[in-house]
Structure formats: C-alpha cells, structure tokens
Image (cartoon, rainbow, N blue to C red):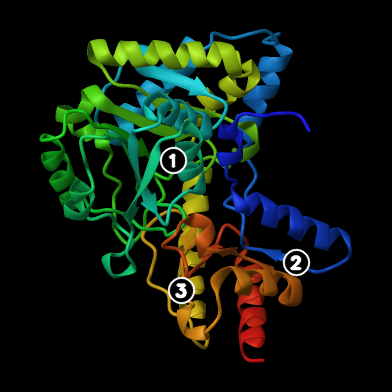
Amino acid sequence: MLHTIAAFDRLGEENAFAVLARATSLAQQGRDIINLGIGQPDFKTPQHIVEAAIKALRDGHHGYTPANGLLATREAVVRRTLATTGVEVSPEAVMILPGGKPTMFAAILMFGEAGAEILYPDPGFPIYRSMIEFTGATPVPVPMREENGFAFSAQETLALITPKTRLLILNSPANPTGGVTPRTEIEKLVKGLEAHPHVAILSDEIYDVMTYDGETHCSLLNFPEIRDRLIILNGWSKTWAMTGWRMGWSIWPNGDSGAHLYDKVRKLAVNCWSCVNAPSQYAGIAAIDGPQDDVDKMMRAFDRRRKVVVEGLNALPGVSCITPKGAFYAFPNISKTGRKAKKLASALLDDAGVALIGGPDFGILGEGYVRLSYANSEENILRALERIEAFLGK
C-alpha cells in the first residue's frame, strides 16, 4: 500500500453530497425520491446572468484571469458590499475564488497547526471541523442551542477563547439551523474580542440576504474595531442560484496585516486553482449589477415554503421545530421519536423516499435533530411531510 501523510486521514466529508449520490442512485433505479437534503436552490440561474456568460464566451474571454480575480469582478463586489452593509472596501482586499469553500480552506490553513485552537459553530457546516482537523489544530465547538434560536451566545463564545485560540469562525444566517444571531449579541461579542487581539475572525455570510420575519443580517464588516483581523466569506451560489458556477468572494483584513494575509491567499490560488474562469466572472458582474427581481421572487417562495415546513413538522408525532429566521433550512428536534438522527434519516430515504440529513453530520451537538432544506417545491415539501408522517406512524 502507498504511504500517505496522516493529515489526509483527518479529512472529513460533507455528507449532504453522499446523501445526494444515494438519492440519485435510487431515483435512477426508478424510485420516486424527494430530496430535501442538499442545500441548493431549485431555481435556475436568472437568464440575464446566463446571457452574460454566453456573451463573454462569444467575445473571446477564454484565457487565464488574475489569480485574485478580474478587477471588474472585484469592483462589482465592492459595489455590492457598499449597498448591503454601508461599508466601502477596497478592491485590493477582495479575492474571487471558485466557490465558498476555498475561503474556508485558506483561512483555516493560515491559522491552523498543531497546538493551535480554532473555534467553530456546532451544529455547523461540517467542512469547518474537517479543515481544522486537517491542519492539526484542535477544533473547539461553539454550541448553537435551540433554546437560543440557534444563535451563538457572546458570553459562551468568549469563555472558550484561550491563549491558544487563533481563529473564530462565525456563521449567520446559519447552515444547518437557519439561526440568525441578533446584532445585540454580535455587539457583545465584538466588545469582548477587544481583550483577545490575537484571535482572527472568519465570518461566513453566504446567506446574508436570506432573512425573514423582519430580521436583517448584521455583517461583521460593520465593526471597524475588528476590521484588521476580519475575513468575510460570501459568494454567488445561494443568492443567485449559481451553485454549479463555483463562484465565491472573500474580503480580507485592511492595514499591513491584511495585505500580508491577502498575498498569502493569492499565492495559494496560484499554487492550487490558478484563477477563476473568465465567463463565470462576467456572469458574476451581471448578477450583482443586474435586476434583482429573480432574487426577490426566490426569497418570497422560500418564505412561503418555510411556513409550510414549520407547520408540517410541528404536526408530526414526536417532532418539534422552531421557526428558522434565515437561510433555507429547518432543523427539527426529533428526539421524542425515540430514534437516532442518522438512522432515522437513512430509513426515511430507503423506506419513504425522502432525503434528509442527520444532525450529527453537522457536529457533535447535532444528535436529536435532522436538517431539512426547503429549497424544493412546495408540492414536494407537502408530499415529503406526508411520507414522513406515514413512516413515523408505523
């Protein structure tokens, strides 16, 4: 057997893709499968964005682009950031990447090593912990509690920081819970971080426009006191239904330390993915600068589905579900069914034809929950709820 380094044995996975593969395989065998597992909008990319990519191809944009992204694309991100946060950033602090994960990869790789500690949300996006363990750093879970609306507690988070802490990862609106941390709690956290200037912050804001019930997203960019150690993760995948385009952006710290980090991630790009493809970047500009009608339409549909999902889940035996305030996920509590979460999710796929994700796939605190994505049609959601009710009633 070939010898590989131990770090690769520490890599985890995102089980949503394993469930997607299993669901696809069952569908190919003729099974009627309703997939509420994958976090992917069921809408098509708006047509004007597609046309911008086609035009770029026809105009001859077939070559390499700068490792940090086209200046025009970075300037579009600057305009979008100003419009959504009121904060003006420099295009020299913006990096265009092939999706959101490369920002996680770069930031965690920069700060993670043996002896270091990195704080991350739990339940949370599984790649956070996977990448932390890959670097050899110690993952320290920050509890996201149902009784707190799956928002983080500033007091609890700050209490976990030690001299070994290098990086704090935040995510609001959150995957997998749909939790939104209120501004008042973020303010408390930022105030407390003044006592820990050695800690960098990675704020995953990929679901920034996806809030409901009057909630508004509070970007960490609104706090200049941490700007010199703040990394923002965002992208096109969720807002404009562009998951397959693999288009993300990140905003890196300002000042001398920021330029130092930015150059490191630029070098990582050169070594790893070279650059982001040109036609997608022109599509990204069109997404930001073009009409947002399709985004608004998508959000109205998600809101309707969210209400259907919450009402339907709370009517199921042994299931309860708080109302998610953001993203397009519900994270129902299934502990009173008497079943383990992953076994229940597996049985629902095999026996009822409904794909969900077990809570433990999102962290050690995920037992007793499953994740349901309502990025599917209302008709399919209602059918899925009927199947789950029949299964639980057996």
| Residue 215 versus residue 137 in the image, above or below | below
- As drawn, the label of residue 165 is none
What residue do we see at 16% from left, 29% from top? 197
Residue 302: percent from left, percent from top: 50, 59
Res. 95 visible in picture = yes
- As drawn, the label of residue 310 is 3
Q: Residue furthest bottom?
A: 394
Q: Which one is nearer the viewer's eye here, 62 or 187?
A: 187
Task: State the residue position of label 2.
Answer: 33
Q: CA distance from mark 1 to mark 2?
A: 28 Å
Q: Secondary structure at mark 1?
A: loop
Residue 329: percent from left, percent from top: 49, 60
User: Quick check: 211 left or right of 354?
Assistant: left
What residue do we see at 38% from left, 72% from top? 322
- Near mark 1 (Cα within 10 A), the count class, few <14, some 14-19 or many ≥20, is many
Q: Secondary structure at mark 3?
A: helix
Query: In the rendered structure, which amino acid carries the disc numbered 1?
Result: Ile
Residue 84: percent from left, percent from top: 32, 35
Q: Secondary structure at mark 2?
A: loop
Residue 155: percent from left, percent from top: 16, 53
Location of the C terminus by quadrant is bottom right
- Near mark 2 (Cα within 10 A), the count class, few <14, some 14-19 or many ≥20, is many
Q: Earlier in the sequence, mark 1 or mark 2?
A: 2
Res. 68 visible in picture = no
Residues tagged 1 and 2 counted as in contact (Cβ below 8 A) = no
Q: CA distance from mark 3 to mark 2?
A: 21 Å
Query: In the rendered structure, which amino acid carries the disc numbered 3?
Result: Val
Task: State the residue position of label 1.
Answer: 206
| Residue 366 versus residue 240 in the image, above or below | below
Query: In the rendered structure, which amino acid carries the disc numbered 2?
Result: Ile
